[in-house]
Image: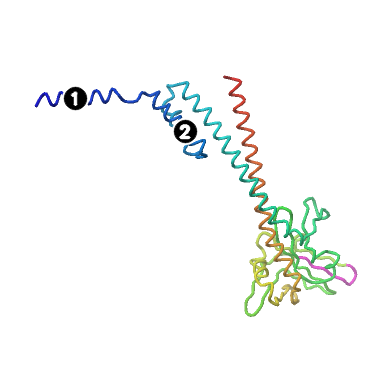
Amino acid sequence: MHTRYITLFVIIGLLTGCGQSRKEIVSQKLDEAIQLRDSGQYNLAKLKLDTIINNFNDLTEEAAFAIRMLDEIKLMEQQRNLQYLDSMIAVKEKELEPLLKNFIRSDEYGSQPILIHKRQRPENSYNRTFIRAHLDTKGEFYISSRYYGTSWIKHNQIKVYHAGESVTSEVVPQDGFNNRRFQDGDSKWEIVSYKDGADNGIINFIASNVDKPLKVQFIGEKYYYIVMEQFDKEAIRDGYETSFVLQELAGLREEKRQVKQQIEKLKKIAQSKEKSS
């Protein structure tokens, strides 16, 4: 009985003595990290390397190699991100191309260029009452109600409606900017801009009902009514749809700019480490 226990202890001791050394464990983890890196599994590779850096830092040569490899993987990640963003930007640019055919780019209305729908050119819309689409190159979109007549109605709100359905904008008080008025002889103009959601869903209502005879009520001290022209409804729908693509494209380009900055930063870090080593 005693002999059996002694034999068991001897076997356990032999097995324990045959375990991997720390260097062997690290070498195996480095091999695994390299395989993961080469197969594009960057997150798993980084986890392996983090384990070496944090738990085996007494093995200075191996830990230093793991740090260098980790920096390389971070750079490879960002380069892969850049390739992805370039491909997505190309897709969005192709999607945007036919949409932009409906617009004219103009630099004549402030510091930022704007996109004017071809069916709502100022020279064709000066003396009429309608709802105008406003779009810039970054995808910011809003509408304005534009009244023309020989007497003031002093409107500050609009309602768009059809067959029992209606949407009413917020009230935009006269401020000389988002709600302004001017005249030339007997001709009077009132322009109210519904920015930052002040349209209260009118844009979406029009874009979703382009094929219906939508009516507009101009609400103020007096009331004025129009039936929307088909091309005005289409201009708002086109501007609304185009704004989403432009915003996505602007977001992708900004993300690309940040990724390129990160790549340059990582390259500089690698260069400084090479010089100091």
Q: Is residue 42 above or below residue 14?
A: below
Q: Where residue 99 sits: x, y (%)?
A: 72, 60
- As helix, strand or loop, the secondary structure at mark 2 comes to helix
In the drawing, does residue 238 fall left or right of residue 105? left
According to the image, label 2 marks what residue?
33
Residue sitting at the far left? 1
Q: Earlier in the sequence, mark 1 or mark 2?
A: 1
Q: Residue at x 59, y 42 (%)?
A: 81
The residue that appears at 48% across and 36% down in the rendered structure is 36
Q: Amino acid under label 1?
A: Phe
Q: What's drawn in magenta, residue-wise? A: 184-191
Q: Position of residue 4 (x, y in %)?
A: 13, 26
| Vertical arrangement, residue 202 with respect to residue 64, above or below | below
User: Label 2 crowding class (10 Å Cα cut-off): few <14, some 14-19, many 20+?
Assistant: many
The tag on residue 9 is 1
- The amino acid at mark 2 is Ala
Query: Which structural element holds mark 1?
Result: helix
Side (left or right) of 20 relative to 184: left
- Which secondary structure dominates the residues rendered in magenta? strand
